[in-house]
Amino acid sequence: MSQPAQSAPLASTSKVFEYSSPDSDVAATDALFLERLETFMDRSLADIKAFSEREGRSYEETRRCVSEWHAKDLFQSSLSRATEHMSNNRHDYVRTVLMNASQMQGTGDFWAGRFMACEFWRALRGGGDHGAKAFKQYCLKNQPLQVAVPTNHPGVEAGPSSSVQATPSAGPKQLDAKSVKAELYETVRRALKTASGVRNAEMKWMNPERLDVYGVRLVGWPPSVPALNPSTLRVSQNRELLEAFKTGIAKFERLPASIHPPAPLPDIEIDHTDEDEDFSWAFDADASPKVTTHASPVV
């Protein structure tokens, strides 16, 4: 007689826990626990009904509010766990992205701390994974040309790291005149900015000796190419000049600080013939200032 009495609550509890979470599988195997839980929930529903009557609201409305409260608590706990998991992994994720996108192959250096990185991020429109990949491609494409640094330059130590070797291009394809000129402009401008550290430095094509204002000088200019703007040079001359900069024959060198001449002061001519400007009497102890007496007017 006792066995049929227990089958009813078990059947009903199976419906109650039809959508149970995996964490409650152990509890669902305990029939006595489920029976007591169902009794507790019945009392809770009775309390909800009594509360709705006291508040003057319908039972279904109050029951729905209670369900929303329980759902809010469940979802907030799940979101908090997910947020905590993301926070714990954020540092590793950022480090992985920076290492993969910015680290130079075969060295311990990073692209991100270099001058070309500053130029890239100034012109970037967009970001995310696409921006990181574009940054890496930009750095690989625009590796700095050879920049010779004198050993007596202040703040620069002599050694293998005092110059950056250019990566020779592997069989560049033949470019037209417009492309050669555009690439020459960009190559020279980038090499000048890298050597001088001045972001808005511009090449002095017709007066390369004036590059000392940026603290650099130009060496290795091909003798067969005149010092003119590439717009006025022949295509063959532009190609020769471009090849010279790419191979490191033509390059910019930093000037030591001692080479920078101080700005000349303007010449000032002093005329000592003007007696009105002579104040030497003021330093003579025996001298006395001249006193001019004016005759009083006759009334």
Image (cartoon, grey):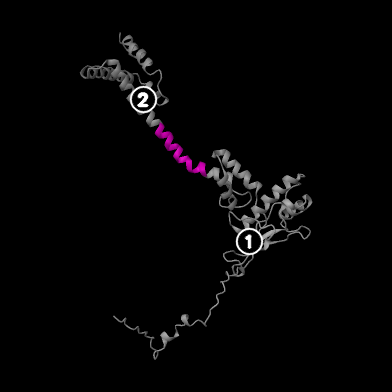
In the image, what residue occupies the spot 62% across and 52% down? 107
Question: Quick one: quadrant of the C terminus?
Answer: bottom left
Question: What residue does disc 1 label?
Answer: 162
- Whether residue 182 is visible to the viewer of this picture, yes or no, is yes
In the image, what residue occupies the spot 38% across and 31% down? 77
Q: Position of residue 37 (x, y in %)?
A: 31, 20
Neighbor class of circle 1 (other Cα within 10 Å; few <14, some 14-19, many 20+) is some
Q: State the extent of the magenta-drawn residues as a range.
A: 79-94
Q: Of 248 and 45, which appears nearest the observer?
A: 248
| Three-letter residue code for mark 2 | Ala
The answer to whether residue 129 is above or below residue 66 is below
Q: Position of residue 189 (x, y in %)?
A: 65, 53
| Three-letter residue code for mark 1 | Ser
Q: Of 281 and 150, which appears nearest the observer?
A: 281
**Outermost residue, bottom side:** 286
- Whether residue 99 is visible to the viewer of this picture, yes or no, is no
Question: What residue does disc 2 label?
Answer: 71
